[in-house]
Amino acid sequence: MFGIIDWLVLAAYWGLSIFIGLYAARGNRSFKDYMLGGGSMPWIPVGISLIATSVSATTLLGVPADVFDVDMSLIMTNVGSFLSILVVGFLFIPRFRKYGIQSAYELLEKTFSRSVRRVAAVFYAMHLVLRTGILLFAPSIVLASILQIPVWVAILISSFAAILYTWYGGFKAVVWTDVMQFLVFFGGGVFALFALAKGIGGFGELATLAAESKKSNWFNGSLDPSNARTLLSAGIVYAVLEIAIRGCDQQFVQRYLSCKDVKAANRSSILSMVLGLVVSLLFYWLGAALFVYYEVKKVAPLPPISPNSFTVNDVFPYFIVNGLPTGLTGLLVAAIYAAAMSSISSAIHALGNTTEKDILCKASGQESIARTKICIVLWGISGTLAAFIAASQAGSLLKNALFFTGLFTGPLLALFLLSFFAPRLRSFSVLTGVICGMLSLLLFNKIPFILNYVPPLTKFIVFSWPWNPLISCTVSVGMAFFVDFFAKLHNFKKN
């Protein structure tokens, strides 16, 4: 159970997070300092911050559960990550640095128009606030169970601390607390894996039994698009989603712009990919170790797995409470909080910048800092409210939110690709193409809240979730050219 020492460990983590965040605020004199750390942040902490932003508490808890239930095949998403690093490094980062922008979507005004910039920013804000609600809610269920507190209290603890140091400390606070939080959740994972391996009989025994149980299987060369656990879907096609996130998400672009030059930004990006692979290996093996520990070696009893009571998502939290010694339990709970707080702090800071620079389109100055701080608090409250709503409508809301956030990644990527390679397209054509791209997903996906809706094209072909960004991006680009062509043809005939 959660003892006094565990509470002390957790309290020390909360205190250290707030202290680092507030201490990092020194030197915030301008809007560039507050938003980009002055544009001269060291690339190593920026790279660590990139992966800390990517790895949420749902990753920390969900990846071991996925391996426990199936196998390690989704580790092939790291192939997509590698491909995305190449594309973003050669295509996106040099352009962001060349234009001297302070937000990702500022580039869209330079190539198209302010309306395109604002639409992209609104799409991004809608996507991110829903995602923030999910990233707060999902781990809070686990934390509430472990700490024996209400879910709403667990949500408030994460959000209040993150809002506080982000509001006060700005970008430097986010980055340096990300570094500390990464060390906490990675260290917690390492300690948990060692504890499991010790109970099993060593890492050699763990590897042998995991292979015999087929939990360490990771490769599937099938070309079936309906299967998300193949090299085609999880590796190659998934790269489109990774490019959209790493190249179009303000959380990532902020970090590229905070480095002193293109070379430093690319180094931070590469470091985040390498660390991402290491984190993936750690938590995928944690899932395999949990299966061997409970189901093969039966080192300790596990409650019967049932959809309505004890699910695979509860296995790792159950081990944290019942399988770890006092102190380490507190460290693992701190690791869950670390991942959750890192996600919300990065999100609300990026949303604050996007609101000020891309939606309000204000010039940088001291007044901008004040407005951005207000926006950060308001977005933090919005994310917290989204988590509260998720807590009251758990199952359906999570699925619905994931559907809506999935609508935006492909079209946002299309906007940037069009700005790079077709900047002469009309803004109307671009925006029409983006709307068509979003609507195209309705041909392959069920619509939330419409229970009887059957996607028309699923009778002929079924696409797994990694394909959605590729489909919507391709349709967005194609329709933008199509609409622009007919607009030019109409003007030609008219003249």
Image: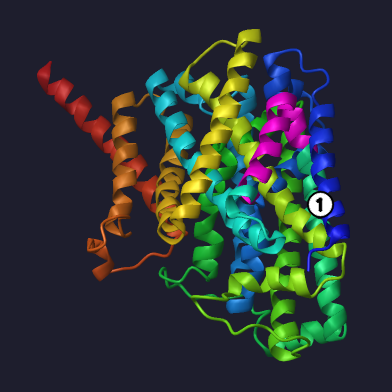
Q: Which residues are magenta?
A: 154-176
The verdict on residue 158 being magenta is yes
Q: How many residues crowd around disc 1 within 10 Å: few (fewer than 14), some, or many (20 or more)?
A: many
Quadrant for the C terminus, please: top left
The residue shown at (46%, 56%) is 398
Name the kind of residue labelled 1 in the image. Leu
| Picture coordinates of residue 239, whole percent (x, y) | 55, 54
Q: Quadrant of residue 62?
A: bottom right
Quadrant for the N terminus, please: bottom right
The verdict on residue 139 being magenta is no
The residue shown at (37%, 48%) is 472
Tell me: residue 240, above or below residue 127. Answer: below
Q: For the stretch drawn in magenta, what is the main secondary structure? A: helix
Q: Nearer the viewer, residue 71 or 369?
A: 369
Q: Mark 1 sits on what residue?
A: 10
Q: Nearer the viewer, residue 385 or 250?
A: 385
Tell me: residue 373, above or below residue 458. Answer: above
| Picture coordinates of residue 476, whole percent (x, y) | 35, 42
